[in-house]
Image (cartoon, rainbow, N blue to C red):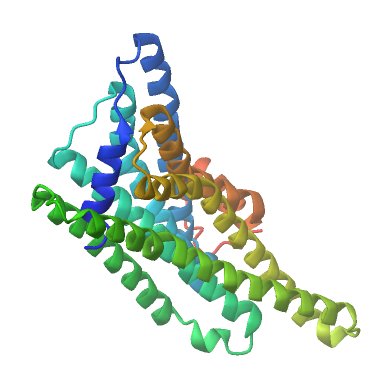
Amino acid sequence: MWTAEALLRTITDSVVAPAILCTSTVCVLLSVILGSLCAVTICGNLLVIISIIYFKQLHTPTNYLILSLAVADLLVGVLIVPFSMAFSVSSCWNEDLFCKIRDSFDISLCMCSILNLCCISIDRYYAVCQPLTYRTKITDHVVVTMIVVSWTISALIGIGVIMSGLNQDKCEENCSNNVLLANIMGLILSFYLPVIIMLCIYFQIFLVAQRQARSIQNTTGQSTKSGATVSKMERKATTTLAIIMGVFLSCWTPFFLCMTFLSFSTDSVSVAVFETLNWLALSNSMLNPFIYAFFYSWFRSAFRMIITGKLFQGDFSNSKLL
């Protein structure tokens, strides 16, 4: 695969190992902070997953894509954060099968999040820019297909990372250009190109939403109130999901810029810098549930019912969430 050996070699060759292990006090503090991040990530995304699966009101194509994104974030909390926490606390960097498996999950789940965000941007494009054909083009079947394709591509990339690690031989004298090319192509295809596509889509959505807002302001009459309300709801959903993308970019862009710098430079970075950027990227999986709760009243209602244990008192799947 195109990212496997190149990305792993870039990281392992360019990160400077620390001279000494952290003190016991610092290790305990790090364990508490990072353990809390892990717990919040898992619990927050579980709330999103349970809410969408249980409450029928949330059974919409857009929420199915949010569900897929939440599953990816949950797996980050379960599979990536604990292993990264062990590395940060122990300051141990070993190039073995265990680390390759961790890296493969890290890369594949990151790719899965990006692909899910791409699918969400496409969903929002049709909802805002082509509302009359939205329900016919973005059906449950189409959304499921998008989700399956996203997870399949991500899984293949993860498997490629492991396989290339197992078959990794010593680099020959003339392979430097191949490694550099693999790094560049990997970074472009896995991050920069999808991000550019999403930004273009959301910019187009913004222009259409602005025209719709002006049209609604210039329209009067009872017959248009329903359409205006629907349009306002779609724009709010688009704004919220655009914020989710903005938070994703804020968390992941520094990490990928660092990887880009390492691809073109012979310099190295300290473990402290690399770990800070890595944890900033991983924190994205914790933040998304808070964004849902802040912007969506129905998610807040669903979270409240789950946390208080109301779901165990009867069947509330058909409840009207405010």
- The percent coordinates of residue 269 (x first, y second) are 38, 33
**Left or right position of 12 against 315:** left
- The percent coordinates of residue 134 (x first, y second) are 57, 84
**Left or right position of 218 against 305:** right
Q: Residue at x 63, y 67 (%)?
A: 238
Q: Nearer the viewer, residue 10 or 310?
A: 10
Count of residue discs = 0
**Left or right position of 309 against 229:** left
Observer able to see residue 60: no
- Residue that sits furthest to the front in the current view: 173
Q: Residue at x 30, y 62 (%)?
A: 154
Observer able to see residue 269: yes
Q: Is residue 81 above or below residue 56?
A: above
In the rendered image, the quadrant that contains the N terminus is bottom left
Q: Residue at x 43, y 58 (%)?
A: 69
Q: Residue at x 48, y 39 (%)?
A: 280
**Left or right position of 224 against 176:** right
Residue 116 occupies which quadrant of the picture?
bottom left
In the rendered image, the quadrant that contains the C terminus is bottom right
- The percent coordinates of residue 264 (x first, y second) are 38, 50
Q: Nearer the viewer, residue 228 or 86?
A: 86
- The percent coordinates of residue 47 (x first, y second) are 47, 48
Residue 98 occupies which quadrant of the picture?
top left
